[in-house]
Image (cartoon, helix red, strand yellow):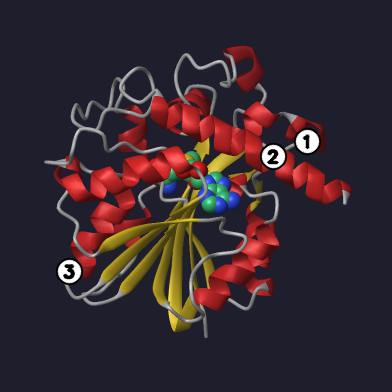
Amino acid sequence: MADQKKSDKIKSAVREHYAQAIINKGGCCGPNLQTFDPDAAGRFVAMAGYTPDELKGLPEDVTTFGCGNPVALAQVAEGETVLDLGSGAGLDLILAAKKVGPTGRVIGLDMTPEMIETCRKNLERAGVTNGEVRMGEMEAMPVDDAEIDWIISNCVINLSPEKEKVFAESFRVLKPGGRLMVSDIVTIDLPEEYRDDLAAWAGCIAGAVSEEAYVELARRAGFVDVEIIEKLVYNEATIGALANESCGCSGSESNLNDAALAKYANRVASVKVSARKP
Ligand SMILES: C[S@@+](CC[C@H](N)C(=O)[O-])C[C@H]1O[C@@H](n2cnc3c(N)ncnc32)[C@H](O)[C@@H]1O
């Protein structure tokens, strides 16, 4: 019971944080993808692995709160169905829609109504006709059994206080042979007492687990070929880009200040994880 209360509290803080982040987009939140500048606002976009070519011609409101570019590495084929867990403003859905083509489908899932509204507008403006966004939680997905060929996700599973459920649900909705390709945050010897800070949780840090625990969660749900295929450790210079530029909103009250962030330097990394349902 106490655990359920704690989970609910974390989820509400996360929902509130991302609602504010997308409402404030244009003011202070989310890198501007149109001015791809690796030295300034766009530094996180470059670190995440998006290329100027991929971002060319996107509608103005599309931004990223992610920590990688899962679509780039997923070998998604034409005609397939892709599910994006925590689809945010829709950037990865738009990129995936290009890969699956008109005979495929992309489905976004998000629990924050403000994000869903923006994502729907962005899909429409980007001319995506084979996509939809569903309101719901990744711990209980509004998705049929074996409906999906690929699950992608960008900096979202770390935010869940119930990660076993997320992996079990991912396994359920994939077709046999279906694949998972996620960018996410893992921790490196993070002291337990650092995990109680809700701002750090919403900033994609405090809820993350170690690389070993992440792989074990996927294996325990039934996944095979679970592999960490890329890893980038955040140091003092880049930890702020993760917590406040990507998973946050520069200038927002729910962000962490430099002093609060320093203790997380070299203790978190972004990874790309691939896995397969047998
Ligand atoms: C860090 S942002 C990433 C958004 C997007 N993937 C991107 O790359 O820009 C996290 C997103 O996941 C959503 N989210 C967080 N926890 C969730 C959950 N348990 N179920 C569904 N969506 C969730 C938030 O509402 C937010 O839109």
The residue singled out by tag 3 in the image is 101
Label placed on residue 191:
1
Q: Secondary structure at mark 1?
A: loop
Q: Residue at x 19, y 42 (%)?
A: 55
Closer-to-camera residue (179/28): 28
Q: Is residue 254 above or below residue 87?
A: above
The residue singled out by tag 2 in the image is 10
Q: Residue 154 in the image: state x and y as whole percent.
A: 44, 50
Nearer the observer: mark 2 or 1; the answer is: 2
Lower position in the chain sequence, tag 2 or tag 1: 2
Q: Residue furthest left?
A: 57
Closer-to-camera residue (64/50): 64
> What type is the residue that disc 1 sits on?
Pro
Q: What is the crowding at mark 2: few (fewer than 14 residues within 10 Å), some, or many (at least 20)?
A: many
Q: What is the crowding at mark 3: few (fewer than 14 residues within 10 Å), some, or many (at least 20)?
A: some
Q: Secondary structure at mark 3?
A: loop
> What type is the residue that disc 2 sits on?
Ile
> What type is the residue that disc 3 sits on?
Gly
Q: What is the crowding at mark 1: few (fewer than 14 residues within 10 Å), some, or many (at least 20)?
A: few
* 234 to the left or right of 24: right
Q: Residue at x 57, y 55 (%)?
A: 137
Q: Gap between marks 3 and 1, in whole Å?
A: 45 Å
* 39 to the left or right of 3: left
Lower position in the chain sequence, tag 2 or tag 3: 2
Lower position in the chain sequence, tag 3 or tag 1: 3
Q: Residue 239 in the image: state x and y as whole percent.
A: 52, 27
